[in-house]
Image (cartoon, rainbow, N blue to C red):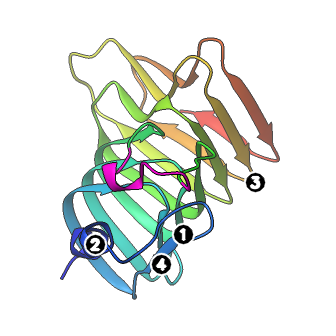
Amino acid sequence: YNINDAINFIILNFDIKRNLYNQWIIKLCPGLYQEKEINVPPFISLIGYGNENTYIEVENVKLGSNTKLKNLTLLIKNKITIDSKIIDNKLLGKEFRLTDLIKMENIILKNEVFESETMIDINNGNLEIKDCNIEIKCIENKINDRNMIDLGIGCKLTIINSNIEVKNSNIKTSIINCKYSDIIIRNSNLKID
C-alpha cells in the first residue's frame, strides 16, 4: 500500500464524513514512501513520526484546504501546488466549510535539482509554514526567473520559526513572489546563496 491508497480509501468510503469537525489524519510510519504524485483533498492530513524517520520522495504534491503536512521530510522533485478550490464533489453539502488554510509544520523540504519556475505555487488559499527547514539547490537551465514561493492575488503566507535557503542560484531567483498578498514572517531566516 502507499499514501494514495490511504487517501483513496477515505475518499471512496461513502460512510466516512469529512468536514471542518471531522478531519482525517493519515499517520505515516517511519520509512521511505515513493510516489509520483500525491493529491491531498480537504480535511485529510499526512503526519509522520518525525522528520528524521518519515520520508516522502515525490514529484508533485497538490494540497487542498484544511490539510496539513507534519513531522516528515519531503524530497520533492518538481513542485507543491496549494489550491483551496480543490474539492471532492461528495463534500458539497450543508456541512461543507473551508478555512482555506493549509499547514506545513516540522517539515524538512528538500529539492536537490530545482529546475522549474516555482517550488511552492499558491494558487488559492493561505499557507502557514511553521518550524520548517527548506533547502533548495538550483541547477542551470533555460528558465530566466525562478520563484521559490509564488503567491496568487489575495493569498496569505505565514512563515514562523523556519529556515529557507536557496543554493547555487546563478540566475534571477526570488524566495517570495507576490502580488496583492499578505505575508507574515516571524523568527525566520531566508537566504539566497
- Residue extending furthest bottom? 29
Is tag 3's residue or tag 2's residue first in the polypeptide sequence?
2
Is 57 colored magenta in this rendering? no
Question: Mark 1: which amino acid?
Answer: Gln
Which residue is the site of mark 3? 161
Residue 3: which numbered mark, if any?
Answer: 2
What's the CA distance linking mark 3 and mark 2?
Answer: 28 Å
Real-space Cα separation, disc 4 to disc 3, in angstroms: 20 Å
Q: Which residue is mark 1?
A: 23
Between 158 and 64, which is closer to the camera in this rendering? 64
| Disc 4 versus disc 3: nearer the observer | 4
Callout 4 touching callout 1 (CB < 8 Å): no
Point out the residue furthest to the right here.
187
The residue indicated by pointer 4 is 48
Front disc: 1 or 3: 1
Who's the residue at 37% across and 73% down the image?
55
Instruction: Look at label 2 and name its amino acid.
Output: Ile
Where residue 146 appears, x then y in whole percent?
40, 21
Give the extent of the magenta segment.
87-95
Residue sitting at x 51%, y 84%: 49
Q: Earlier in the sequence, mark 4 or mark 3?
A: 4
Q: Amino acid at mark 3?
A: Asn
Q: CA distance from mark 2 to mark 1?
A: 17 Å
Query: Within the image, what quadrant is residue 165 found in?
Result: top right
